[in-house]
Amino acid sequence: MNFNQKNYDISDLIVRDMKQRDIASVLNIEREVYPFPWSEKILADLFYFGLESEVHHSTVIDGGDKSSIIHGYSFWQMIVDECYILNFAISQKFQRNGLGSFFLEKILEEANQIGAQRATLEVRIGNKPAIGLYEKFGFSVIAMRKDYYVDNGKKEDALIMWLQNL
Ligand SMILES: CC(C)(COP(=O)(O)OP(=O)(O)OC[C@H]1O[C@@H](n2cnc3c(N)ncnc32)[C@H](O)[C@@H]1OP(=O)(O)O)[C@@H](O)C(=O)NCCC(=O)NCCS
């Protein structure tokens, strides 16, 4: 896959493993982009799982030498030969410039290099930007989990999306 980037010079950006010092930036983005963000403890636990096991992965996209700003992050797991994306986000101010596509492509490449043959994730049925991104990569909806998300008593269905043949 090779996506053209719009209005953004990605040549300085670096996709790398998350470090402990990134957690505060990851938490800021999490709070910025999700109405019901995961807590700092959940994010930190996922990061530490990644240090301890080959299954859990924590990845960030940062600005490189010119700015070490964290532009986005992802937590993902290897389940045998599947890449399961638990969380994937781009900071609000950097959205709609091709970064999500660039970042997702890098993660899927890395997963493929360590044995992933396919990829899967859950997404809120109302999350049109994310569904659009995943469809662009060839993900398709294989099932729906009714009322999977419950936030302050409000329920939302989850779509289970699947990418066969990485
Ligand atoms: C989903 C997300 C990662 C996309 O990041 P991004 O950097 O804006 O993505 P890109 O610029 O690479 O766009 C890729 C595609 O996503 C879709 N898309 C992105 N933003 C969109 C929007 N606001 N409305 C509709 N489609 C959108 C489009 O299909 C787009 O392709 P196009 O540019 O050819 O139209 C970003 O919106 C985000 O972080 N959202 C909040 C966190 C989230 O919901 N994560 C997914 C959890 S499952």
Image (cartoon, helix red, strand yellow):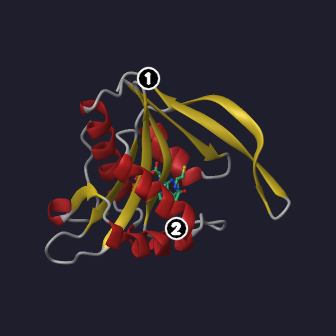
Residue that numbered label 1 is attached to = 164
Q: Residue at x 13, y 73 (%)?
A: 65
Which badge, 2 or 1, comes first in the chain's sequence? 2
Using the image, determine if residue 108 lies above or below residue 50: above
Q: Note whether residue 160 is visible.
A: yes
Q: In this view, does 49 lie to the left or right of 32?
A: left
Residues marked 2 and 1 touching at CB (< 8 Å): no
Q: Which of 77 and 73 is in front in this view?
A: 77
SS for tag 1?
A: loop
Q: Is residue 109 left or right of residue 130?
A: left
Identify residue type, mark 2. Answer: Glu
Q: Where is residue 96 in the image (x, y as percent from the top left)?
A: 41, 62
Most distant residue in the right direction: 153
Q: Note whether residue 7 is visible.
A: no
Q: Which quarter of the rendering shows the N terminus? A: top left
Q: Identify the mark at residue 119; answer none if there is no mark.
A: none
Task: Mark 1: give few (<14), some (14-19) or many (20+) Cα within 10 Å.
Answer: few
- The image quadrant that residue 97 belongs to is bottom left
Q: Where is residue 46 in the image (x, y as percent from the top left)?
A: 47, 55
Q: Identify the mark at residue 30; answer none if there is no mark.
A: 2
Task: Mark 2: give few (<14), some (14-19) or many (20+) Cα within 10 Å.
Answer: many
Using the image, determine if residue 67 lies above or below residue 64: below
